[in-house]
Image: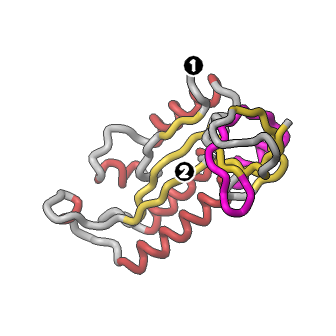
Amino acid sequence: KLCPHFHLSLQSGSDAVLAKMNRRYRTDDFRTVTAGLRRTFNNPGLTTDIIVGFPGETEEQFAESLAFCEEMAFSRMHIFRFSARQGTRAAAMPNAVSPEEIGRRSQVMLELADRLALQYHQTQVGQLHQILLEQLRPDGFFEAYTPEYVPVRLPAAPGLAGGKLITVRGVAAEYEFLICEQT
Protein backbone atom coordinates (compact mmCIF):
# COMPACT_ATOMS: atom_id res chain seq x y z
CA LYS A 1 0.00 0.00 0.00
CA LEU A 2 1.13 3.51 -0.78
CA CYS A 3 -0.01 6.87 0.45
CA PRO A 4 -1.08 8.95 -2.55
CA HIS A 5 1.76 11.45 -2.13
CA PHE A 6 4.79 11.53 -4.40
CA HIS A 7 7.78 13.83 -4.13
CA LEU A 8 9.37 14.20 -7.56
CA SER A 9 12.40 16.48 -7.56
CA LEU A 10 12.07 18.43 -10.80
CA GLN A 11 14.76 21.13 -10.23
CA SER A 12 13.68 23.16 -13.29
CA GLY A 13 10.81 23.24 -15.76
CA SER A 14 13.16 24.28 -18.58
CA ASP A 15 14.78 21.53 -20.64
CA ALA A 16 17.76 23.78 -21.40
CA VAL A 17 18.40 24.34 -17.69
CA LEU A 18 17.91 20.64 -16.92
CA ALA A 19 20.61 19.89 -19.51
CA LYS A 20 22.96 22.42 -17.88
CA MET A 21 22.27 20.71 -14.55
CA ASN A 22 23.28 17.41 -16.17
CA ARG A 23 19.87 15.85 -15.39
CA ARG A 24 19.00 12.74 -17.37
CA TYR A 25 15.31 13.60 -17.71
CA ARG A 26 13.33 16.29 -19.50
CA THR A 27 9.95 17.88 -18.98
CA ASP A 28 8.22 15.37 -21.28
CA ASP A 29 9.53 12.53 -19.10
CA PHE A 30 8.15 14.33 -16.07
CA ARG A 31 4.76 14.83 -17.77
CA THR A 32 4.58 11.10 -18.49
CA VAL A 33 5.33 10.14 -14.89
CA THR A 34 2.87 12.61 -13.36
CA ALA A 35 0.13 11.61 -15.83
CA GLY A 36 0.63 7.96 -14.85
CA LEU A 37 0.40 8.80 -11.15
CA ARG A 38 -2.77 10.80 -11.72
CA ARG A 39 -4.31 7.91 -13.69
CA THR A 40 -3.41 5.42 -10.96
CA PHE A 41 -4.29 7.48 -7.87
CA ASN A 42 -7.27 9.72 -7.22
CA ASN A 43 -5.97 13.30 -6.90
CA PRO A 44 -2.53 12.42 -5.50
CA GLY A 45 -0.36 14.98 -3.77
CA LEU A 46 2.57 15.79 -6.07
CA THR A 47 5.37 17.81 -4.52
CA THR A 48 8.66 18.96 -5.99
CA ASP A 49 11.89 20.89 -5.54
CA ILE A 50 12.73 23.83 -7.81
CA ILE A 51 16.01 25.74 -8.07
CA VAL A 52 15.83 29.30 -9.39
CA GLY A 53 18.80 31.26 -10.71
CA PHE A 54 20.97 28.39 -11.94
CA PRO A 55 23.96 29.88 -13.84
CA GLY A 56 22.91 30.89 -17.33
CA GLU A 57 19.18 30.62 -16.61
CA THR A 58 17.62 33.27 -18.83
CA GLU A 59 14.40 35.12 -18.13
CA GLU A 60 12.78 33.03 -20.90
CA GLN A 61 13.95 29.78 -19.29
CA PHE A 62 12.68 30.94 -15.90
CA ALA A 63 9.32 31.70 -17.53
CA GLU A 64 9.31 28.16 -19.03
CA SER A 65 9.96 26.71 -15.59
CA LEU A 66 7.19 28.80 -14.06
CA ALA A 67 4.71 27.75 -16.77
CA PHE A 68 5.68 24.09 -16.45
CA CYS A 69 5.18 24.15 -12.67
CA GLU A 70 1.76 25.68 -13.16
CA GLU A 71 0.91 23.03 -15.76
CA MET A 72 1.94 20.28 -13.33
CA ALA A 73 -0.32 21.79 -10.62
CA PHE A 74 1.92 20.69 -7.76
CA SER A 75 0.33 20.38 -4.34
CA ARG A 76 3.49 21.77 -2.75
CA MET A 77 6.75 23.18 -4.07
CA HIS A 78 10.03 23.67 -2.24
CA ILE A 79 11.84 26.63 -3.81
CA PHE A 80 15.60 26.94 -3.53
CA ARG A 81 17.76 29.85 -4.61
CA PHE A 82 20.87 28.75 -6.45
CA SER A 83 24.00 29.36 -4.42
CA ALA A 84 27.43 28.51 -5.75
CA ARG A 85 29.37 25.91 -3.78
CA GLN A 86 33.13 26.08 -4.05
CA GLY A 87 34.59 23.30 -6.19
CA THR A 88 31.41 22.35 -8.03
CA ARG A 89 30.95 22.54 -11.80
CA ALA A 90 28.04 24.93 -11.38
CA ALA A 91 30.15 27.38 -9.36
CA ALA A 92 32.50 27.78 -12.33
CA MET A 93 29.75 28.19 -14.95
CA PRO A 94 29.52 31.52 -16.80
CA ASN A 95 26.57 33.92 -16.80
CA ALA A 96 25.79 33.85 -13.11
CA VAL A 97 22.38 35.25 -12.27
CA SER A 98 22.61 38.23 -9.90
CA PRO A 99 21.52 37.72 -6.29
CA GLU A 100 18.83 40.38 -6.76
CA GLU A 101 17.40 38.58 -9.78
CA ILE A 102 17.55 35.23 -7.99
CA GLY A 103 15.59 36.84 -5.13
CA ARG A 104 12.97 38.20 -7.53
CA ARG A 105 12.58 34.84 -9.28
CA SER A 106 12.35 33.06 -5.95
CA GLN A 107 9.53 35.38 -4.86
CA VAL A 108 7.63 34.86 -8.13
CA MET A 109 7.99 31.07 -7.84
CA LEU A 110 6.94 31.16 -4.16
CA GLU A 111 3.80 33.08 -5.09
CA LEU A 112 2.96 30.40 -7.66
CA ALA A 113 3.67 27.68 -5.08
CA ASP A 114 1.26 29.28 -2.60
CA ARG A 115 -1.46 29.64 -5.24
CA LEU A 116 -1.08 26.01 -6.36
CA ALA A 117 -1.09 24.77 -2.75
CA LEU A 118 -4.32 26.65 -2.08
CA GLN A 119 -5.90 25.23 -5.25
CA TYR A 120 -4.93 21.70 -4.24
CA HIS A 121 -6.11 22.17 -0.66
CA GLN A 122 -9.46 23.41 -1.99
CA THR A 123 -9.89 20.04 -3.75
CA GLN A 124 -9.67 18.42 -0.30
CA VAL A 125 -12.57 20.40 1.20
CA GLY A 126 -15.48 18.01 1.77
CA GLN A 127 -13.22 14.95 1.51
CA LEU A 128 -12.79 12.41 4.29
CA HIS A 129 -9.25 11.60 5.44
CA GLN A 130 -7.81 9.27 8.01
CA ILE A 131 -5.10 11.15 9.88
CA LEU A 132 -2.69 10.49 12.73
CA LEU A 133 -2.83 13.37 15.20
CA GLU A 134 0.63 14.69 15.92
CA GLN A 135 0.94 17.46 18.46
CA LEU A 136 -1.36 20.02 20.00
CA ARG A 137 -0.25 23.50 19.02
CA PRO A 138 -0.34 26.48 21.41
CA ASP A 139 -3.19 27.93 19.31
CA GLY A 140 -5.48 25.00 20.27
CA PHE A 141 -5.22 23.07 16.99
CA PHE A 142 -3.72 19.65 16.41
CA GLU A 143 -1.23 19.19 13.58
CA ALA A 144 -1.51 16.23 11.22
CA TYR A 145 -1.15 15.31 7.54
CA THR A 146 -3.56 13.69 5.11
CA PRO A 147 -2.30 10.67 3.16
CA GLU A 148 -1.69 13.15 0.28
CA TYR A 149 0.68 15.05 2.61
CA VAL A 150 -1.60 18.03 3.07
CA PRO A 151 -0.94 19.72 6.43
CA VAL A 152 -4.05 19.62 8.62
CA ARG A 153 -5.25 21.78 11.49
CA LEU A 154 -7.94 20.24 13.68
CA PRO A 155 -9.48 22.07 16.64
CA ALA A 156 -8.73 20.40 19.96
CA ALA A 157 -11.65 18.53 21.51
CA PRO A 158 -12.17 16.22 24.49
CA GLY A 159 -10.78 12.74 23.82
CA LEU A 160 -8.30 13.85 21.18
CA ALA A 161 -4.61 13.27 21.79
CA GLY A 162 -1.39 13.05 19.85
CA GLY A 163 -0.86 9.58 18.39
CA LYS A 164 -4.58 8.95 17.86
CA LEU A 165 -5.79 7.82 14.41
CA ILE A 166 -9.08 9.50 13.46
CA THR A 167 -11.26 10.33 10.45
CA VAL A 168 -11.76 13.97 9.55
CA ARG A 169 -13.48 16.01 6.86
CA GLY A 170 -11.86 19.01 5.20
CA VAL A 171 -13.96 22.11 5.86
CA ALA A 172 -11.80 25.05 4.75
CA ALA A 173 -8.61 25.56 2.77
CA GLU A 174 -5.69 27.86 3.40
CA TYR A 175 -2.54 27.82 1.28
CA GLU A 176 -0.57 26.52 4.29
CA PHE A 177 -3.02 23.86 5.50
CA LEU A 178 -6.46 22.28 5.42
CA ILE A 179 -8.81 22.98 8.31
CA CYS A 180 -10.69 19.85 9.29
CA GLU A 181 -13.41 18.66 11.63
CA GLN A 182 -13.72 15.24 13.24
CA THR A 183 -16.45 13.06 11.73
Q: Nearer the viewer, residue 157 or 121?
A: 157
**Residue 56 visible:** no
Residue farthest toward the top in the current orientation of the protein: 1
- Which residue carries the number 2 mark? 68
- Which residue carries the number 1 mark? 1
Image x and y of residue 37, in percent: 58, 29
- Decide if residue 121 is on the left or right side of residue 163: right
Q: Name the element at disc 2.
A: helix
Q: Nearer the viewer, residue 42 or 108?
A: 42
Image x and y of residue 148, in percent: 63, 37
Q: CA distance from mark 2 to mark 1?
A: 30 Å
Q: Inspect the magenta stretch and tell me whether residue 121 lies in it.
A: yes
User: Of the residues tagged 2 and 1, which is closer to the observer?
Assistant: 1
* Vertical relation: 176 (above or below) 25: below
Range covered by the magenta-colored residues: 118-141
Q: Name the element at disc 1.
A: loop
Going by the numbered disc 2, the residue's amino acid type is: Phe
Q: Nearer the viewer, residue 1 or 138?
A: 138
- What is the crowding at mark 2: few (fewer than 14 residues within 10 Å), some, or many (at least 20)? some
- Point 56% across, 24% down: residue: 2
Q: Give the mark nearest the N terminus, 2 or 1.
A: 1
Q: Quadrant of residue 98?
A: bottom left
- Point 61% across, 66% down: residue: 111
Going by the numbered disc 1, the residue's amino acid type is: Lys
- Point 58% across, 35% down: residue: 5
Image quadrant where one finds the C terminus: top right
Image x and y of residue 7, in percent: 49, 40
